[in-house]
Amino acid sequence: MKNTKGFWGFLIFAFAFYGISQLLMVMNIIPYHYVNTMVFIAINIILAVSLHIVIGVTGQFSLGHAGFLAIGAYVSAIMTMKLQLPFFVALFVGGTIAALAGLVVGIPSLRLKGDYLAIATLGFGEIIRIMFLNIDYVGGAAGMQVSHLTTWTYAFVCLVITIVVIVNLTNSSHGRACISIREDEIAADAMGINTTYYKVAAFTLGSFFAGVAGGLYAHNFYIIQPGNFGFIKSIDILIFVVLGGLGSMSGAVIAAILLTVVSTFLQGYAETRMIIYSLVLIIVMLYRPQGLMGTSEITSWFKKKGGKSNDNRTTA
Amino acid sequence: MEWIQQLVNGISLGSIYALIALGYTMVYGIIKLINFAHGEVFMIGAFVGFYAIRGLGLGLFPALLLAMLVCASLGVIIERIAYKRLRHATRIAALTTAIGVSLFIQYVTIYFRGAQPEGYPDVFPSANFKIFGVSISSQSIFILVVSILLMIMLQFIVHRTKIGKAMRAVSHDAEAAQLMGINVDNTISATFAIGSALAGAAGVIFGVYYGKIEPLMGIMPGLKAFIAAVLGGIGIIPGAMVGGLLLGVVETFVSAAGYSMWRDAVAFIILILILLFKPTGLFGKNMREKV
């Protein structure tokens, strides 16, 4: 009962937020480059949440998320630029192909654990990047021209769908199965949970949303290059999840908002940004290895999220 | 004779990988941590060598020694500051910290000297020797001699000295070793020092061989060396050497066959195949998981 109430509350809040932001944009109160930042924040939240389902909920350490982002970006770009399909079809197809790739990568590699899984997914991410680097159809290292199609509406709708799906999944029995794997895989296995099934399912779902984010990402710029989807991009996404709290979705969302705003301000100082990122990563891990929010949040989730988003709207 | 020539090139590249892989494997063997910052220690080694030759006017061997010394201290400092607290933390926390340290070293280096590459000074007489119709550069021989010497020294340290015995004991069972009166902290520091010194040496010989260094040069060789360590069986010292040499040779042949763009992908494919079919590596034994 409480859950459904929260669900409708969230939807009403989301649409109110969207209505107000759209109104402000139409009235030109929010200038164009802030709109761009907001789209970027939405994309980063989708990425953070899609990795959260893999690392935070299921406890599988993946370092190759940028690979699925790349697949979504390139596939959707091919759909719109080469096949002239509408944008929402391209987003969906991009997500689906990324999910398929996630399935193909997940089935063999999720037999691995811990560090080995991290390195294997890192390897897969790099292989995907090198593949795009070598396919002339998508422009190789020079990259591919993409027209600017991502609007605030697209980004926001995708964001809401992602959050609704992942929250509902986390609160379902499937989600609890995933959490039990995170807490203790051997015990979960002993309790009769099909660990491989849930690990692969979480991985595939995470890849799907990463692919959708990739589609939005690609159509938010005018060109995509394999270099955008390297190891560093995976780390960028990882930082959202790790900083926000491993197992806390609102934590991941808040971290994504905060860090996107910070990195927008530090755009001209790439080295400084990376030094700050790495220091934050080290210090948080040393003094609060469970992340800033830990796994706690669920109870006052909607209030916290609302407050943060409002704050962000006024600052961003 | 073409392929013998490639084999020599592959072994030269492979011995660089092997030197870095030794550090990975030793650290993993003792604290079960993938020290992501190891590739950056390698990079720092290359730069220390560069500044020692350019700025201080040292010869090649003093520069090599200085780089090893600086890297050994850097390794110990990294361990003391970043990893010591995390010995009983989760794997995700430890690995994330290691990635953080790696990024930190890269971007602090860029912050202080910029990202532009640097040409390595030509300190080593360049000459080609003809042996059975195969021409071998003096640099290749230099790499090979230095790495073999370092590996022999490492074998000596690990198997013939007291600290080596302590290292083997701690890697076997840290708690039992502590009960036997071994200072585990010091042993771990020594492991980091030795592994990092080898990476520093690898950095200098990399600079001499390829003639160009830059602050982000540690990433790829670092990952490749890690793959080499996994290939040979992580935690096993001879495994790292064999894995490094093997990977270097495979990579050189892939490049020679005209697929140089796919070189890095091949290394990762090897890694994934090894992880899937023999996760303990070529030299590893299967171990049952303790519940």
Image (cartoon, coloured by chain):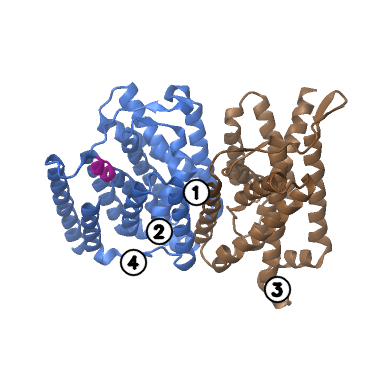
Chain colours: A blue, B brown
Q: Which residue is mark 3?
A: B183
Residue B113 placement, left or right of A233: right
Give the Cα distance between marks 2 and 3: 34 Å
* Label 3 in the same subunit as label 4: no
Residue A114 in picture, x, y percent from top left = 53, 55
Looking at the rendering, the stretch of residues picked out in magenta corresponds to: A33-39
Q: Are marks 4 and 2 in contact (CB under 8 Å)?
A: no
Q: Chain of mark 2?
A: A
Element under disc 1: loop
Give the Cα distance between marks 1 and 3: 37 Å
Residue A18 in picture, x, y percent from top left = 17, 47
Give the Cα distance between marks 3 and 4: 39 Å
Element under disc 2: helix
- Mark 3 surroundings within 10 Å by alpha-carbon count, few (fewer than 14), some (14 through 19), many (20 or more): some
Give the Cα distance between marks 2 and 1: 24 Å
Element under disc 3: loop
- Mark 2 surroundings within 10 Å by alpha-carbon count, few (fewer than 14), some (14 through 19), many (20 or more): many
- Check residue A296 in the rendering and tell me which mark sits there, or answer none: 4
Residue B145's image quarter? top right
B230 versus A97 height, above or below: below
Residue A10 placement, left or right of B159: left
- Residue A289 highlighted magenta (yes or no): no
Residue B149 placement, left or right of A108: right
Badge 2 amino acid: Leu
